[in-house]
Amino acid sequence: MKKYQNNYKYSVVGLIMLCMFAGTSCENFVDVVPDNVATIDNAFKLRNEAEKYLFTLYSYMPRNGETNGNIGFLAGDEMWIPYQTSIGSDPFEIARGNQRRANPYVDVWNGGIFVGIRHCNIFLEGLQRPGSVPDLGEIERRRWIGEAEFLKAYFHFYLLRMYGPIPIIDKNLPIDASEEEVNVKRKPVDEVVNYIADLLDQAAEKLPESIADRNTEMGRITSPVAKALKAKLLLMAASPLFNGNADMASLIGPGGEALFNLEYDENKWQLAADAAAEAIQVAEAAGHRLYTFTETGLDITDTTITELSIRQAVCERWNPEHIWGNSNGTAALELQRHAMAPLSTEHNHNNARKILSAPMKIARQFYSQNGVPIEEDKTLDFSDLEQLRTASHEERFYIEEGFETARINFDREPRFYASLSFDGGKWYKYDSPTNSDEGTFVLRSKFVDYAGSNHAFHKNVTGYFIKKLVDWNQSMSSSGATYRTYDWPEIRLSDLYLMYAEALNEVEGPNATVFEYLDKVRVRAGLMGVQESWTQYSRQPEKFSTKDGLRTIIHQERLIELAFEGHRFWDLKRWKKANEMLNQPIKGWNMKGETTNSYYQVSTLFTQRFIAPRDYFWPINEGTLIQNPNLVQNVGW
């Protein structure tokens, strides 16, 4: 923090260097700070230069559409990669239990986030100074202030989720600030949450309901985005990690103040439910809705249309389900290349690297075709993972007819097939050889096959390929590959529906409204409602009738619906389930197997180690603690 407490007046070179170190992107509207401007003061003399400064604030947003940019992708257990590949992932070192307090992995405390907050403060001060930017209209000025307030709130939220209690940087310090002022302190969690929530409310009042100029302004913040982030913030604050967490009793500030409130407060769930309900109302009023695939002129079945509705809810550019789309970075370009698999002998492994792999436990997580967990389904037996079965004609839209594959790949819900591919699985795309889902691409992944793990660097390590992240418009040829970029969905409407259901269940228990919002998501996924599915097919038919039982259902529904979007890692933490789930072995098929019998053998790749309560929050760099004696280290570090 100390190194950022210097004069407001940066040279343009200095600003550009800060943007470079923070990972600035100039894609879409994002641009560098003012051209040929000697000081920050000059940035607020003309609208054009002030606008560039505004867009620079956006450049500090994490690149969540990139494999390494999104911490949730590889820091947990949802995706696994070959170790020490060309990705060189710091988050993956965290998944492998290698986090450290000296030079921590993904050390955003000393990275660009606090720099981003500082620039938000400079921008807000400059834009609200009397006489600044005289050629800027008041309506637009108000909007820009709202955008900067939102980004400042988001940057605080991002740090809070990672570190727990953090300093609140509401204003920048002057050059003559005292050492005590410069040595900022971490604030109690509840104070930080209230500060962020208030800032988001302020921003929402100033922001537009929707983007009017879709050609140049997509990705800029709207009032539905601010309300949705507030709902996400308050849901996190109500969850066990932050609400009455006795494990954090020893986290005390330098003056003896408790940084966590150790008393559980049920009213926090009510605040979260109210915020989610408001966010849904605002989003739907602005035209947001669950995405359904409506492309015409294709010879495809309802089965494939349902699958594409699920896949394209993520990958369809700026679709109405994306409440908040983040286009910072490469806009999911290299993410798709890392997820995509070769689907014929002509497809080059460098263009379809297939290194993002889903562990076996994630494949098991998806429901049966009856919409209940596979271990609960009383009509289907999934007890033997290695049992083999041959696909019938009726199953041809999910699995190649006549192909022998694992029993676990049969009789699953549509989201299983939309999210994952596997040996013998169908993969329909725009460039399907037949323009139909009859006779479309089939993935073959035994060691000797075209998607086999026989490349020196680009290999799938579990046998489950992440189809969900690849836009259906992707095309391959012997000469190369074409990937269409898309905005990364930070918050989808389905996410908001599930937030509301979760919070409302904690407040009121099972009721019609909770089931309504759960079932909205399930119906789009091709399933019956919760009550119907559990009553008819579960060995625990009354599970949904209690708060505890329905909580378990909601958690699994969320893990399935939002799979591979970077949410699982943070959800497991806020639910305090990480010490259970992240201490399990990572398993997959034997990817060196060349025959059916040798391939379908479950192998253990790695056994994760998560130390609770230490690993629930990031360590603060030891050097930072030496530099600022008012900061205290997180528990266990």
Image: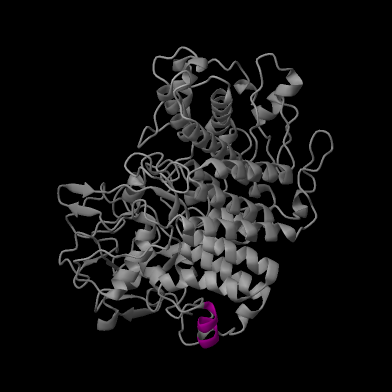
What colour scheme does the image use?
one colour
Residue 258 placement: quadrant: top right
Magenta stretch holds residue 531 = yes
The number of callouts visible is: 0
- The quadrant of the picture occupied by the N terminus is top right
Residue 365 spot, x, y in % from top left:
49, 69
Magenta stretch holds residue 550 = no
Q: Is 587 or 87 nearer to us in this picture?
A: 87
For the point 61% across and 41% down, the residue is 202
Horizontally, residue 100 falls left or right of residue 494, namely right
Q: Is 130 or 553 nearer to us in this picture?
A: 130
Residue 239 placement: quadrant: bottom right
- The quadrant of the picture occupied by the C terminus is top right
Task: Give the overall secondary structure of the magenta segment.
Answer: helix
Horizontally, residue 534 falls left or right of residue 252, namely left
Up-down: is 522 above or below 68? below
Residue 147 spot, x, y in % from top left:
51, 37
For the point 35% across and 53% down, the residue is 339
Residue 451 spot, x, y in % from top left:
27, 59
In the image, the segment drawn in magenta is 530-536
Q: Is residue 392 visible?
A: no
Q: Is 138 or 296 nearer to us in this picture?
A: 138
Q: Can residue 21 be seen in this view?
A: yes
